[in-house]
Amino acid sequence: MNAIEFEDVKKSYGSGEAVRGISMAVGEGSLVALMGASGSGKTTMLKMVNRLVAPTSGKILFFGEDTASMDVIALRKRIGYVLQSAALFPHMTAAGNISTIPDILGWDKARTKLRVKELLSLMGLDPDKFAGRYPSQLSGGEQQRVGIARAMAGEPSVLLMDEPFGALDVITRSRLQDDLLSIHRRSGTTILFVTHDIDEAFRMGNKVAVMNRGVLAQYGTPREIVENPKDGYVRQLLNFLSVEALKRAGEPK
Amino acid sequence: MTAYLLHYYGYMLRAAASHIEMIALVMLFAIPVSAALSVLVHVFRFLAVPVITILEILYTIPSLAFFAILTPISGLGVKTAVIVLVCYSLFFLVRNFLAGLEGIDPLIIEAAQAMGYSRAGMFLKIELPLAMPALIAGTRLACMSSIGIACIAYAIGAEGIGSILFEGMRQMSYVKIAWGVILVVTLSVAVNNLMAAAERYFARRADPGRT
Ligand SMILES: Nc1ncnc2c1ncn2[C@@H]1O[C@H](COP(=O)(O)OP(=O)(O)OP(=O)(O)O)[C@@H](O)[C@H]1O
Ligand SMILES: [Mg+2]
């Protein structure tokens, strides 16, 4: 079954076309990396899934159901969303931020507390030190990690992540990439992961979707893309792929 | 000066008390009404222009003229004064409350929406705490303006510190005028400081990490 299906989805803002007729399916339990240059429409794609943005035309199916006819709150409760900027709630502590979705879902206090601790540790943030801190007492990277924990707290069936590792140093970034991969393998959560870093896209994605100015230039496994780049844009991109990532892409996953 | 104080302190206290009572009554009506109006406008955006325009027009009516217009309808006395002061206060309160709600970082609103908050849940848990400092700032302005205009309301028989000031002017008594001024300024400063403290408190609550 597909967790998400885009069917000829278009989105225009006034006269500008951000997404120009994209069809692609994200299989349940897969991790799809959505990559493309700045302004290519990646964030717009994510926001159409949780209906923060309505497509101009086309359909988006969530586990086979047309999202347009779903109850928007019920839909959003099943989707975790990590914003490009952390966008934490400034009046709540890190723990408070992470508890928001469990609270909305009506979890009991003990379960929420446990989950908060577990997620903070998972993000490499010592719960004793960070749980009580307010967003403005956290560094950019720490905020971003709390944002990721917040999105995962309710154990959503789909996780939308918009450049979640953008503000992190290479070491933390690489560690969190590994952690996300192992969380993904363990939990079976479907992840749609936006990045503009080709190495990250090829490292993380079971499949990689390359966007170019609102169009899907290619969609396939890293191996398919490396072995058979579809057009000049993808070929040009591959020039920037590191040797290790290239080698890894060649091996079957 | 002191002789007057010793002789009339009871009268002065009563005048100040009625003044405070009038302002409290005004806020008692103005705050809930403005909160309801602001929420309505915030949810139904098309109401913004008509509501703000009406409040602006009311606010531009000079106080004495406003008292005069209402007197045939609601009579002389505190009732008319309170109605006028509520109308003026709504302008400050609604404008500030809306500015507070609209001033929240759109990304924070987006994050809250994406989590699946209901409209009411989002308002109570996210928007209200973040807009609270602006609401208090509006209340402060409304109080300040009301304290001043309430003095003029003596012209239609609403007792307060205005009573002392008007008597002073009629009798050309500098002592009375001076005491009236001292009373009203003290009240203004006290309320202003109180509200400023409340504003700081809620600003801290809206972003405790910053302070
Ligand atoms: N609310 C909006 N109103 C008008 N134009 C918009 C709006 N949101 C996005 N756009 C435009 O749509 C296009 C795609 O934007 P989008 O945010 O999806 O890009 P992106 O791929 O996420 O870019 P980045 O990597 O910089 O985040 C851009 O040209 C952008 O200017
Ligand atoms: Mg983006």
Image (cartoon, coloured by chain):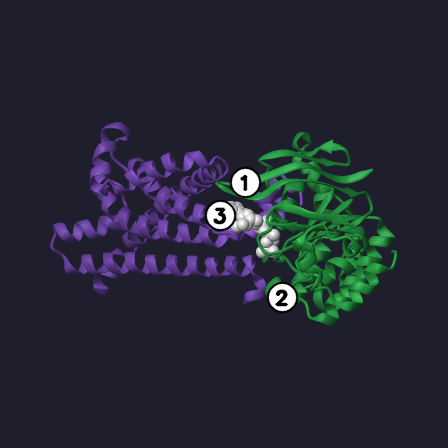
Chain colours: A green, B purple
Q: Are marks 1 and 2 in contact (CB under 8 Å)?
A: no
Mark 3 vs mark 2: tell me if same chain: no
Q: Amino acid at mark 2?
A: Gly
Residue at image coords 78%, 64% = A245
Decide: few, some or many residues near mark 2? Use Cα within 10 Å; few <14, some 14-19, many ≥20.
some
* Figure quadrant of residue A202: bottom right
Residue at image coords 33%, 38% = B53
Tag 1 residue: A12
Answer with left or right where residue B108 lies relative to residue B15: right
Answer with left or right where residue B196 lies relative to residue A150: left
* Nearer to me, A247 or B190: A247
* Residue A232 pos. (x, y %): 66, 54
Q: Where is B172 relative to B67, above or below? A: below
Q: CA distance from mark 3 to mark 2?
A: 25 Å
Tag 3 residue: B101
Regarding mark 3 in the picture, which secondary structure is present there?
A: helix
Regarding mark 1 in the picture, which secondary structure is present there?
A: strand
Mark 1 vs mark 2: tell me if same chain: yes
Which corner quadrant holds the N terminus of chain B?
Answer: bottom left
Tag 2 residue: A140
**Residue A147 appears in the picture as rendered:** yes
Q: Where is B120 relative to A149, above or below? A: above
**Residue A125 appears in the picture as rendered:** no
Q: CA distance from mark 3 to mark 1?
A: 28 Å
* Nearer to me, B195 or A44: A44
Q: CA distance from mark 1 to mark 2?
A: 32 Å
